């Protein structure tokens, strides 16, 4: 009886890479779990606190003395009421905020006071408040989730991320200035005559990026900047060749898409985990996203300037037909570019630090500035009050 020859196994480099990565991850994770038990919450809180080099306070506003700010009842951002007050959050004129702290300046104002209007909740004592604000679809910060604190410690050890990511190349945005403007030419039929790509997508290892990001003194606004990025894809099948960077779900169990949770409101709408590591000075131009976002910061500092969707027209967005559609065409660091419409906008700001989780509802505008080397990951999970908020986007002739 003739037999069919055995088929040679097909070499799958992706499967091998994932197996090697998972093996590296398991080894170093075990090492750090033994050194720093995830159950030692007191020590982990102390570590995260040491990582926060600056303390930021809300700027003094004369109208607060009369318990109102643009008609909004007074509230303490560090001791907010159980439910969002009417008109929440506070907002200020965009030019006033940018004059107080120009985005091209890496140093905070000398008084360390910022235009923060969103509440910051402590996980241990105010989680119920955070849940109320999330259900109300308004932005806020939750600090010191004990599930996040072990990751904060691990990611700030010299060998941890370097070992896991190894010598694999990852997409890195490269720019000859501090602006890393998003663009996409797919489905754009007619490119503007004077348009050229505002940045370049290259590949780097984590160690190569870290060497660039850690240079001293930090680069100026006209120097080269690099934005390191990689994504995690949940492995629903359990097979090694399915999914990418699946170890991220062990590091950030908040983003487990198999069940509804505080962080994953509609897990069936998940789109993976997106990690973006910034170097000092990196600027991501103002834009909105069409789905709700939870943003976790494991190390460093990031400045977020936020605007309600009702200020869409004031953001001076590129049209959808432009490669950088839904992003602001204004250089927020250059006052000579401010238009009359832009000057009428209102914003607030916040500095994310290690152990912070920012909830950002869909369609809220955000301008992002890296103050230091920082590690951020985010995940999206569906759309909240779409009908209520998308009308503002439609006013700008945009859709979510």
Image (cartoon, rainbow, N blue to C red):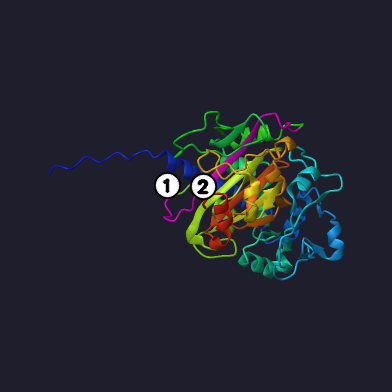
Identify the image quadrant of residue 13: top left
Q: Is residue 113 visible?
A: yes
Q: Residue at x 48, y 46 (%)?
A: 244
Magenta: main secondary structure equals loop
**Residue highlighted by disc 1:** 241
Reading the image, the residue beneath label 2 is 22
Residue placed at 62% from the left, 55% from the top? 309
| Residue 381's disc number | none
Q: Is residue 253 left or right of residue 189?
A: right
Q: Say whether disc 1 or disc 2 marks the residue closer to the N-terminus.
A: 2
Q: Residues within 10 Å of mark 2 (few under 14, many from 20)?
A: some
Q: State left or right for residue 46 relative to residue 253.
A: right
> Is disc 1 surrounded by few (<14), some (14 to 19) or many (20+) residues within 10 Å?
some
Q: Nearer the viewer, residue 213 or 221?
A: 221
Question: What SS does tag 2 mark?
Answer: helix
Q: Which residues are magenta?
A: 218-239
The residue at the point 57 percent across, 52 percent down is 395
Q: Is residue 254 above or below residue 32?
A: below
Indicate whether 125 appears above or below 212: below
Q: Quadrant of the N terminus?
A: top left
Label 1 or label 2, whichever lies nearer to me, is 1
Q: Secondary structure at mark 1?
A: loop
């Amino acid at each position: 009886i003739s037999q069919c020859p055995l088929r040679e196994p097909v070499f799958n480099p992706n499967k091998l890479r994932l197996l090697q990565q998972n093996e590296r991850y398991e080894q170093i994770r075990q090492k750090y779990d033994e050194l720093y038990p995830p159950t030692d919450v007191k020590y982990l809180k102390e570590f995260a606190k040491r990582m926060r080099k600056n303390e930021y306070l809300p700027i003094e506003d004369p109208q607060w003395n009369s318990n109102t700010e643009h008609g909004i009842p007074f509230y303490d951002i560090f001791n907010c009421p159980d439910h969002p007050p009417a008109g929440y959050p506070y907002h200020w004129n965009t030019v006033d905020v940018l004059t107080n702290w120009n985005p091209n300046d890496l140093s905070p104002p000398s008084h360390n006071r910022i235009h923060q209007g969103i509440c910051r909740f402590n996980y241990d004592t105010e989680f119920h408040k955070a849940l109320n604000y999330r259900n109300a679809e308004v932005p806020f910060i939750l600090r010191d989730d004990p599930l996040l604190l072990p990751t904060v410690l691990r990611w700030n050890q010299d060998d941890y991320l370097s070992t896991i990511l190894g010598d694999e190349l990852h997409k890195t945005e490269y720019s000859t200035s501090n602006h890393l403007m998003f663009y996409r030419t797919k489905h754009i039929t007619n490119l503007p005559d004077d348009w050229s790509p505002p940045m370049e997508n290259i590949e780097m290892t984590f160690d190569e990026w870290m060497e660039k990001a850690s240079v001293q003194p930090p680069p100026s606004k006209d120097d080269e900047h690099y934005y390191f990025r990689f994504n995690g894809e949940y492995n629903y099948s359990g097979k090694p060749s399915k999914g990418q960077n699946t170890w991220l779900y062990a590091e950030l169990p908040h983003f487990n898409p198999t069940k509804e949770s505080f962080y994953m409101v509609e897990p069936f709408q998940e789109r993976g985990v997106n990690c973006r590591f910034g170097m000092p000075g990196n600027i991501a131009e103002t834009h909105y996203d069409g789905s709700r976002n939870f943003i976790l910061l494991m190390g460093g500092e990031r400045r977020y300037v936020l605007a309600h969707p009702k200020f869409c027209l004031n953001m001076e967005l590129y049209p959808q037909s432009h490669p950088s559609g839904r992003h602001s065409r204004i250089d927020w660091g250059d006052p000579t570019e401010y238009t009359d419409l832009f000057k009428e906008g209102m914003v607030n700001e916040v500095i994310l630090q290690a152990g912070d989780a920012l909830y950002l509802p869909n369609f809220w505008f955000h301008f992002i500035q890296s103050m230091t080397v920082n590690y951020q990951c985010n995940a999206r999970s569906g759309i909240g009050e779409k009908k209520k908020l998308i009308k503002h986007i439609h006013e700008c002739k945009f859709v979510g």
